[in-house]
Image (cartoon, rainbow, N blue to C red):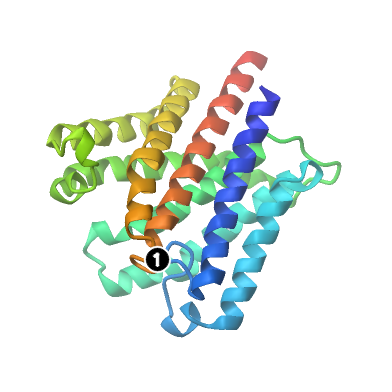
Amino acid sequence: MRDTAKLWRLLFALSVIGIALLQLILMIFMPVILPWPDSLVISVPAIWTGSIFLIGLAVFIMIDKLSRNAAIDLGVVFLVLCVLFHLPFQLKLTPFFFGNLTNVFKLIALSGCSLIIASGLTPREEPHWLEKIIPIGPYLFALTMMVFGVMHFLYTDFVKELIPLVFGRSVIWVYFTGAALFAAGLGITINVKRALAARLLGIMILIWAVFLHLPRAFAAPQAGHGNEIVSVFEALAFSAGAFKLAIVSKAKKAAV
């Protein structure tokens, strides 16, 4: 189980590194990281500084002795970016359009995943000063899953067009996946069959990464300044967070 937990930790860290490297390649902040102001989004010094910082924290997450504190730091960084940049930008741009909050909730989920990663690691002798923030990780992650589930019902026509043709673009798939996202998020939130809900959620998102996001990334790698590629990394990070949560939840239940 320990090896499996480390695998998901590594996958999460590599996903963050992937997003940061893409920023360095394209010399622009990905919308999920920094959407505004425009002058900062394309600032070369800021892109290098921000991307190297993310890569550094992700690398530390892969190192056993440094991983817990680095995961906490990364989770906090994502929340700070959300509060200082994403929320003001979205409220200024389209305050009454719920659909444009997608990147806000993605960043909240990434923060939650990072804190979930931290929760499964042994604290150091000198605990991180923000240790107490760790327990909110599953709730941040679950919130995004429930919101995305609701979005499946609000924006059915848009979501239907994302379904790979091999599955048939039926509205049934939209409703099924939307309900599954909401149910998984609810189960995690109220802690009812949390490990099972997280495991099934991880499987579903991993399937999306392979059959939905990867083909779209290969078909249009430069679309939206590489946003399709970012979607692959996001899905892998969310899947890793879900699987890690399942392991942590199962371990806590066994310890009771």
Percent position (x, y) of residue 179?
25, 32
How many residues crowd around disc 1 within 10 Å: few (fewer than 14), some, or many (20 or more)? Answer: some
Nearest to the observer: residue 157 or residue 190: 157
Quadrant, the C terminus: top right
Percent position (x, y) of residue 36?
42, 76
Q: Is residue 43 above or below residue 194?
A: below
User: Horizontally, is 131 left or right of 26 in the view?
Assistant: right
User: Horizontally, is 218 left or right of 126 in the view?
Assistant: left
Nearest to the observer: residue 130 or residue 81: 81
Nearest to the observer: residue 71 or residue 224: 224
User: Horizontally, is 189 left or right of 15 in the view?
Assistant: left
User: Among all residues in the image, which is located at the extreme front?
Assistant: 219
Percent position (x, y) of residue 220?
33, 60
Identified by mark 1, the residue type is Leu
Query: To which residue does mark 1 refer?
Result: 87
What is the quadrant of residue 251 in the picture?
top right
| Residue drawn at point x = 64 percent, y = 30 percent | 5
Quadrant, the N terminus: top right
Q: Is residue 130 visible?
A: no
Q: Is residue 60 visible?
A: yes
Percent position (x, y) of residue 150?
25, 42
Q: Is residue 30 above or below residue 206?
A: below
